[in-house]
Image (tube, grey):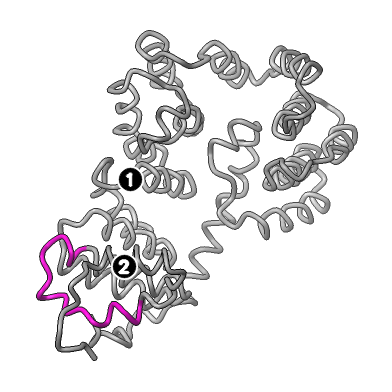
């Protein structure tokens, strides 16, 4: 039930205040004080978006879907609501509807972070052309800035250049054509500054040749002279992963991968890179039983698989191709079981 008096602060101001006060769990209750029909266009959009997010955050995806659907009805031009609705369609296994939502979103109306997520869904569902389309406005934004330095672009709301680039290469690999990434790299070298494009290109060429021997020699040399005070887990895991791809002895490759000791200040997800490469080694060797064990462990840790930039950077794009159909089948099964598609919203009176 709504209160008679409309709050003076906007829904966004409410959410920000509750966040600062450590009471964000009260957001859903506080939002019920608003009469959305009496809010201005911007505040109405924020209300419906937050109203859906509140249900999502407490784990009620069915209610979140209903609320985002209602939000789209009342704010049909809202790209953030459309994006959130697309995510809920994906959770329901409704992939055509998901892409219809994402196709109506673009950067900067939707944040670069969210469009990168849309590109990740395109990767998961085998739609590389859509992934490239979602990333194009982000890629164009680097050229508007003229600088590719990671910190410089990040503070301006863009992903690291290397992350966007790696997504684009993953999509090129899926499409079996590097024409667009070749052109993008050439333009980047000519028009962007403050970035080590030569090293990026060396890894790119190694990927295209499926031969990382020159790059691993360079990486091993770098590690030998690296200051021990700084974390090196990323480089050590990458070195072992690339050597495993080039190698012919799966037993030796697995032993090398599993011998890596990660420090507390290394990325925790590097353990899952070791895990997925262990599974890949068994897969390449035709060791189905061992591969199945490691695959199940990996999928339990990384339910959405790894992002395409990691699959490219650690050279397991080929193995994740084997895993994507498993993800898709699981998502369709979970979506069908997790939603009551016929019942109306249980709290439609509140929106």
In this view, the residue in front, 177 or 340, is 340
Label 2 packing within 10 angstroms: few (<14), some (14-19), many (20+)? many
User: Quarter holding the C terminus?
Assistant: bottom left
Q: Residue at x 38, y 58 (%)?
A: 95
Q: Residue at x 59, y 50 (%)?
A: 305
Q: Hey, which residue is sitting farthest top in the picture?
A: 190
Determine contact: label 2, label 1, CB under 8 Å.
no
Nearest to N terminus: mark 2 or mark 1:
2
- The residue that mark 1 highlights is 111
Q: Is residue 114 left or right of residue 253?
A: left
What residue range appears in magenta?
A: 28-45
What is the x, y in percent for residue 76?
15, 61
What is the x, y in percent for residue 141?
30, 28
Q: Is residue 56 above or below residue 242?
A: below
On residue 50, which mark appears?
A: 2
What is the x, y in percent for residue 186?
41, 11
Q: Is residue 263 left or right of residue 189?
A: right
Predominant SS of the magenta segment:
helix
Q: Is residue 86 above or below residue 335?
A: above
In the rendered image, which quarter is residue 191 located in? top left
Is residue 22 at all visible to an observer of this figure? yes
What is the x, y in percent for residue 258?
85, 41
Label 1 packing within 10 angstroms: few (<14), some (14-19), many (20+)? some
Determine whether the residue tagged by mark 2 lies in a helix, strand or loop. Answer: helix
Q: Is residue 32 magenta?
A: yes
On residue 326, which mark appears?
A: none
User: Quarter holding the N terminus?
Assistant: bottom left
């Amino acid at each position: 039930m709504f209160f008679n008096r409309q709050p003076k602060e906007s829904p966004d101001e409410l959410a920000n205040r509750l966040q600062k006060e450590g009471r964000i769990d009260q957001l859903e209750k506080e939002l019920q004080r608003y009469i959305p029909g009496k809010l201005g266009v911007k505040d109405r959009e924020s209300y419906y978006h937050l109203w859906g997010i509140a249900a999502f955050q407490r784990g009620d995806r069915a209610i979140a879907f209903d609320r985002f659907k209602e939000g789209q009805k009342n704010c049909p031009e809202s790209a953030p609501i459309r994006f959130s609705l697309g995510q809920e369609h994906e959770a329901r296994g409704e992939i055509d509807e998901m892409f219809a939502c994402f196709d109506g979103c673009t950067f900067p109306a939707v944040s670069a972070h969210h469009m990168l997520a849309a590109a990740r869904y395109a990767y998961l569902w085998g739609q590389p052309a859509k992934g490239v389309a979602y990333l194009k406005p982000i890629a164009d934004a680097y050229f508007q800035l003229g600088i590719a330095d990671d910190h410089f672009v990040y503070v301006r709301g863009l992903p690291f250049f290397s992350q966007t680039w790696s997504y684009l290469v993953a999509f090129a690999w899926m499409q079996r054509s590097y024409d667009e990434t070749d052109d993008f790299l050439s333009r980047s070298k000519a028009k962007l500054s403050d970035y080590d494009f030569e090293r990026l290109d060396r890894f790119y060429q190694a990927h295209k040749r499926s031969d990382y021997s020159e790059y691993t020699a360079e990486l091993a040399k770098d590690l030998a002279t690296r200051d021990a005070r700084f974390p090196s887990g990323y480089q050590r895991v990458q070195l072992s992963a690339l050597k495993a791809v080039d190698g012919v002895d799966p037993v030796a490759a697995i032993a090398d991968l599993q011998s890596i000791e990660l420090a507390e200040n290394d990325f925790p997800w590097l353990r899952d890179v070791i895990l997925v490469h262990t599974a890949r080694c068994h897969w390449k060797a035709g060791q189905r039983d061992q591969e199945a064990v490691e695959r199940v462990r990996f999928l339990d840790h990384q339910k959405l698989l790894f992002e395409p930039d990691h699959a490219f950077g650690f050279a397991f794009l080929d193995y994740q191709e084997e895993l994507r159909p498993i993800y898709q089948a699981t998502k369709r099964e979970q979506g069908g079981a997790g939603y009551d598609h016929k019942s109306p919203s249980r709290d439609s009176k509140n929106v």
